[in-house]
Amino acid sequence: MTADDRALRALTEHVEQVALVDHHVHGTWAEDGDPVALANALNEADTEPLADPATAWDTQLGFAVRRWCAPLLDLEPHASVAAYTARRAELGEPEVARRLLGAAGVDAWFVDTGWSTGLTSPDGLAALGGGTAYEVARLETLAERLLPTLDDPGDLAETFAAHVEETAATSVGFKSVIAYRCGFGVDLDPPAPRAVAEAARRWADGVRDGRAPRLDDPTLIVSGLYAALRTRRPLQLHVGFGDRDLDLAAVDPLLLTPLLRRPEVRGVPVMLLHCYPYERAAGYLAQAFAEVHLDVGLTTHFLGARGVGAVARSLELAPFGKVLYSSDAAGPAELHLLGARLWRNAFATVAGGWVSSGEWSLDDAVRVASMVGRDNARRVYLGVDL
């Protein structure tokens, strides 16, 4: 074995052993999922039931499921879709989840609880996958739950700010889906109190027919961002790829530049999630603003074998201390497993190539793997500096 071979083996072994911190994730299915539900879960962008669920398997993600998840369910790699779904049904959802989540090698799960219907709780996720779970509170969900309790909706801003401050005591951070609700091309300066009160009353008037409130007013959403910033907790923002409810052109992270220049942001970690196809723009922002961090979660498992490129791009401009691992997995445990499996594969391939070419040392590659996979998240969210 050559010196290069030994170095690559050492790097791969280290990457495999890193106990990951998944800094943005959701629960896994709480009940058995049928083959149609599984196929639909393999498509992020289409919000309608797939006309032909079989098409979801002829994708990078579909192939990755059959390659990496099948052996954990006692099947050969690349088992047929029929064999895979039959075995899954035979084992049942809890056993599938225990096998796949446990194999992900995650030590800490930072769970966005804003979308939780049909999914396990943070503690339920940790019970299946091991490790410790922490809550990330979604701002829009907090506001939607608060609105019906108010005698005067015009009091929303003050009451919401107090609620956010209280929530900060039990959550490691906050998440906003401003990308889905209005995009980034809105006025990102703090709105005037009177404008917030008027917007809150309009929102309440619009839901008095018994509908569940859905917050999509830019004034209220931006006001909520500043309430979160005042807690000094990390603020997660969905960026780029998602389902078709968002306008992809309106969620380029460069549109967040006016917000990032605001004094209220100074010293508050801003976590850009997913980023595809804007990884390079996110990397620029991470270099330009001390507060900005990024990940390519969700991207890695949807790109499957092509996720190597996304991981490489995340390591271009951004300082390595500001790149984090996440899966953004939600629903079938296959996504939790693949987020980890494909990130490990991609990082070992990318950094291993740089070590082989002499561009990186083995020691540096090992150190960066630990930073991205675990240590950066522990420092930013938990104040643990290793």
Image (cartoon, grey):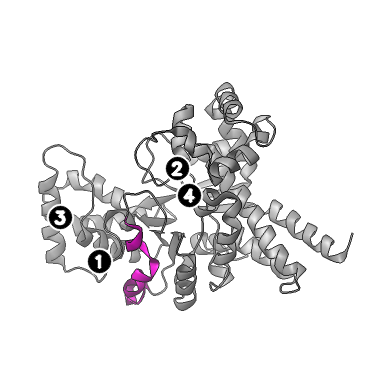
Please name the residue shown 39% across and 45% down the image. 113
Q: Position of residue 122 (x, y in %)?
A: 47, 42
**Residue 171 % position (x, y):** 42, 53
Distance from Cα at disc 1 to Cα at disc 4: 26 Å
Q: CA distance from mark 2 to mark 1?
A: 29 Å
- The answer to whether one can see residue 130 in this image is no
Identify the mark nearer the N-term, 1 or 4. 1
Q: Residues within 10 Å of mark 2 (few under 14, many from 20)?
A: many
Furthest residue to the right?
Answer: 1
Q: Which mark is residue 186?
A: 1
Which residue is depicted at the point 88% across and 63% down?
2
Q: Amino acid at mark 4?
A: Asp
Residue 162 drawn at (x, y percent):
26, 57
Q: Earlier in the sequence, mark 4 or mark 3?
A: 3
The reply to whether dot 1 and dot 4 touch (C-beta < 8 Å) is no
| Numbered tag placed on residue 328 in the rendering | 4
Q: Residue lying farthest top?
A: 90
Specify the principal SS of the magenta part: helix
10 Å crowding of disc 3: few (<14), some (14-19), many (20+): many
Which region of the structure is painted magenta?
A: 247-265
Residue hosting label 3: 200
**Whole-Å distance between the Cαs marked 2 and 3?**
35 Å
Crowding at dot 4, Cα within 10 Å, few <14 / some 14-19 / many 20+, comes out as: many
Tell which circle, 2 or 3, labels the residue nearer the N-terminal end.
2
Q: Is residue 225 above or below residue 112?
A: below
Q: CA distance from mark 1 to mark 3?
A: 17 Å
Query: According to the image, label 2 marks what residue?
Result: 43
